[in-house]
Amino acid sequence: MRNTLLAAAFALTATAAQAQETEIRVHYAIPTIWADTQKALADAFMEKHPEIKITLDGPAESYADGVQRLLRESVAGTAPDVAYVGLNRWRILEDRDLTQPLDGFIGNSPSDQGYTPALLSLGRFEGKQHALATSASTLVMYVNPNLVEQAGGSMDNFPTTFDGVIELAAKIDALGDNIDGVWIDRHDWRYQSLLGSFGGRPMNEEETDITFDSEQGIEVAALYQRFAKEAGMKSYSDKDARQALPAGTLGIMFESSSLQTRFEEGAGDAFELTVKPLPIATSDKEKVYFPTGGSGIVMLTSDEEKQKAAWEYISFVTSPEGQKIIVETTGYAPANAKVVEDKSYLGAFYEKDPNALVAHTQIANYAGPWYAYPGPEGVAATDLIAASLVEITEGANAEKTMKDLAETLRIQLGMK
């Protein structure tokens, strides 16, 4: 009888626990970077919070694809509870009143939780916190030292100017038909990063006018053409470039610091992949601005009970514990100040991984919000920028193309 009563008690307890379990659906993108990390985060969280079940939706291939899916799901009433989105994409969701402000959950002492004003700025708009950064990346140079040395260069005296990089890349490109000197994607974020190196901005602070048709913006656009004409840059895709670098056939690649782990694993023992910071083109260091890539997390559910569980998950992935998992498995820089300040989290990691320290230091010195073009045509604007950069790379006049593009976007974005 006693065993029967115990069994019944355990059954009731289990049933009650199941009844109290809250399921949170989580959306994310870019599985090549995030799949393993998302599982690790979910498992670590559920171990601490057995009353909350994390269900990962099938990932979107890119942040752009992801935000479009979220828009469709919101119309259909099937949107997830929480979503990881590009730091330049969450404003699209906010513009449609889909994000739930997080201010009431964060409380009055965000810095005590590791959320510094700079980090909060990445997800703040018009006085409300709509997103929290979950990872940060910056544009860096990935370098194959073997090809640099074969071309007569030196890693100890690696060029710190774009002119010097182009000159070295041309020498690497001349090593053989199967060797490429340099590659950079024709992409809004890459363009903004180079623009920040020159001290320029894509829009004014009020976001009421385009400013990339400035002298700096045109010079940056012309860099793409110089990479092609002077250094032999090929017009292959980012997928092909991400295979060429670890395969040892690409000398210098301008790419997100988030791909460091993947590239190092791909290179293996063939060569010692090295990360170099982006050249600074302006003499006024205070004007340097590197848009911070990576992701932010937003709460989409309006259900009060689910919001509590969703916040538990959001606070975990943005905490030092969650950020440690993200840094160690992706190559992204942390989005929580405590992780950097307290060496008990990543001190040993940085000692063993000087490449990561290069990227994370660059973020600490020059990071800022990734400009997102306002309004419903914001995503289309980035596509037009990419298309224009392709035209310039292939020989179009940089000044005319960028000035025409700026006028087109002023009209498309309702700026005139």
Image (cartoon, rainbow, N blue to C red):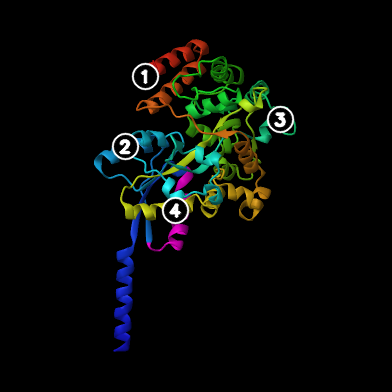
Picture coordinates of residue 411, whole percent (x, y) = 37, 16
Query: From the viewer's perspective, is residue 396 above or below residue 274?
Result: above
Specify the quadrant that holds the C terminus: top left
Q: Could you say which is closer to the camera, residue 360 or residue 29? A: 360
- Is 386 inside the magenta-drawn segment? no
The answer to whether residue 72 of the structure is visible from this angle is yes
Query: From the viewer's perspective, is residue 272 above or below residue 342?
Result: above
As drawn, the label of residue 412 is 1
Lower position in the chain sequence, tag 4 or tag 2: 4
**Over which residues does the magenta segment extend?**
33-51
| Residue farthest toward the front in the current orientation of the protein | 108
Amino acid type, residue under disc 3 in the picture: Phe
Label 3 to label 2: alpha-carbon separation: 45 Å
Dot 3 surroundings within 10 Å: few (below 14), some, or many (20 or more)? some
Q: Could you say which is closer to the camera, residue 333 or residue 284? A: 284
**Pointer 4 residue:** 39
The answer to whether residue 349 of the structure is visible from this angle is no
Dot 4 surroundings within 10 Å: few (below 14), some, or many (20 or more)? some
